[in-house]
Image: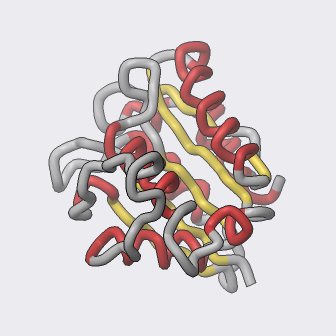
Amino acid sequence: MSRFLFLDATTREPGHTGNSETLARHAAASLPAAAEQRWLKLAELDLPPFVDLRHTAGSYPPPTGDLKTLLDATLAATDLVFVSPVYWFSVPSPLKTYLDHWSAWLRVPGVDFKAAMAGKRLWVIATSGSREKAQPMFDSYRLCAEFLAMEFRPPLWGKGGAPGAVLADTEALAAAQSFFAA
């Protein structure tokens, strides 16, 4: 059974649905009924800043609180979906914090994070003003997937801007209908 973890990286104020989430929800609607879906808004989780202990302590304690919830959800998923608007040609800060914690999870005793991530699929659903300007972010995600031997799927991109702008991008909405079937 497929278990999809949707990680929404928007920083829009609560109560406002961003274009990336709108596009992701259109894509998720086409998943089979048997596919499990879990949605987490990263900005609503209490994620501490990442502190690099690799060259001092060498290992990390097991995560607690929301960070443990996020690690457990990540390990349980067969498919990770980064719902990621493009901010300044790059990764939104909540998702960057999540990715930085991967460095810690690689070094938590008893969590073989790299082996656990191998073979999972990484999907990206993003919106921005220009597909070309989203490419550096997509490349960053692809490199993360390659490092952990994950399968990186071609991203779904839509034209963003003010909330609801993606609804005018008929090409992106059509691609969303079959995005997870590819």
The outermost residue toward the front is 56
Figure quadrant of residue 10:
top left
- Residue drawn at (59%, 65%) of the image: 29
Q: Position of residue 167 (x, y in %)?
A: 46, 38
Q: Is residue 30 visible?
A: no
Q: How many marks?
A: 0
- Residue drawn at (60%, 31%) of the image: 140
Figure quadrant of residue 169:
top right
Q: Is residue 34 above or below residue 6?
A: below
Left or right of 103, for residue 61: left
Looking at the rendered image, the quarter that the N terminus falls into is bottom right
- Residue drawn at (30%, 37%) of the image: 163
- Residue drawn at (29%, 72%) of the image: 66
Q: Position of residue 139 (x, y in %)?
A: 65, 28
Image coloring type: secondary structure
Q: Which of the pair 131/163 is nearer the observer?
A: 131
Q: Position of residue 95 (x, y in %)?
A: 41, 46
Figure quadrant of residue 81:
bottom right
The outermost residue toward the right is 182
Q: Position of residue 53 (x, y in %)?
A: 39, 51
Q: Which of the pair 117/11 is nearer the observer?
A: 117
Q: Which of the pair 59/114 is nearer the observer?
A: 59
Q: Is residue 131 visible?
A: yes
